[in-house]
Amino acid sequence: MQLKTRVFQGVSDGPHLLITGGVHGDEFESMSAMRRLIRDILPAFLQGKLTLVPVVNEAAFLRGTRAAEDDLDLARTCPGDPNGSITERTADALSTLIRSADYYIDLHTGGNIMEVWPMSGYGLVPDVDVLDTQRRMAQAFNLPFVWGTNCALDGRSLSVARDAKVPAIYTEYMGAGRCHRDGVQAYYDGCLNVMGELGMIDRQPRESVVLHTIEDNRPDAGHMQVCNPSPLTGLFEPRVSLGAHVVTGQIIGVVSDVMGDRIVEVASREAGIVLTLRVFSRVHEGDALAVIVEV
């Protein structure tokens, strides 16, 4: 399998930057921002090579869902299998591209189910030089929250980059099944900011809007799908808003069964900022409802 790419080769030598969007099929801001980059990048002003993949997971995008028809999460399937299912083949093609790059940016959103406060993240890899570069890239991308987390989780695009020693960051911006104009602009600007930081284009640093920089090397840090799980299957009604500060034990939402015979208040297990919040109300028992990050 080969992914649909647009490759820009600059007029002078420089690094190879890979930027991907649509690893999940319902992450629309990333796709729109990449379309703008394809329109605006001028090779005459580029040093090095830029590879853009607006929609990695095309099979999922055509379904309008996070995953393709095999129901595998592409962000848990890397490095994939060239002879496997559609998602495994896509993961293999993505992993091959990542290994070919000098730097990597993976653009995400909360998709149809979640909203995520604008953030850039990276793995706390043991290679000091790679880690320092990732920190610079995340700060340069210039979103309000910067989050370095444990790098041990496998199956991800960033775990492929980790193993190949390719400096890599991922980003998140809102979601809720929409394409937020502010998110598209922030992603467009952020990619150009990183290209400027890497010396690929002439672009002066922008005034920083970063509010928090957190590094957390605990084993499950950054694993958004296991945080504040729903106690039952039913309907979730949030009681907090994205970006709000909460205290330990504060009620973040209520889950009830469909008849309202059982109603359970869900208390936050941590104090901090609501980084991620579920916006699709139907939940299954164990589904993540919110991610709270201590600041």
Image (spheres, grey):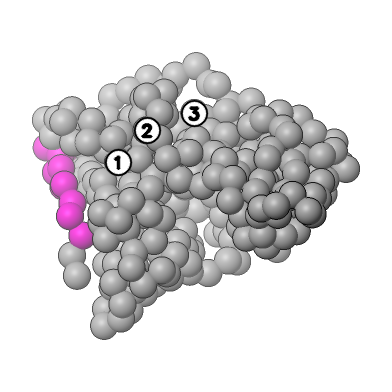
From the top left corner, tell me how far across and down residue 33 is, in percent.
30, 34
Question: Are the two marked residues, 3 and 2, in contact with CB atoms closer than 8 angstroms?
Answer: no
From the top left corner, tell me how far across and down residue 230 is, in percent.
71, 56
Residue holding disc 3: 142
Label 2 is placed on what type of residue? Answer: Cys
Residue holding disc 1: 31
Decide which of tag 3 and tag 2 comes sooner along the chain.
3
Label 3 is placed on what type of residue? Answer: Asn
Residue at 28%, 72% in the rendered image: 86
* SS state under label 3: loop
From the top left corner, tell me how far across and down residue 279 is, in percent.
57, 41
Residue farthest along the bottom direction in this orientation = 83
Label 1 is placed on what type of residue? Answer: Met
Residue at 16%, 31% in the rendered image: 39
Residue holding disc 2: 179
| Image mark for residue 103 | none
Q: Is residue 269 left or right of residue 135?
A: right
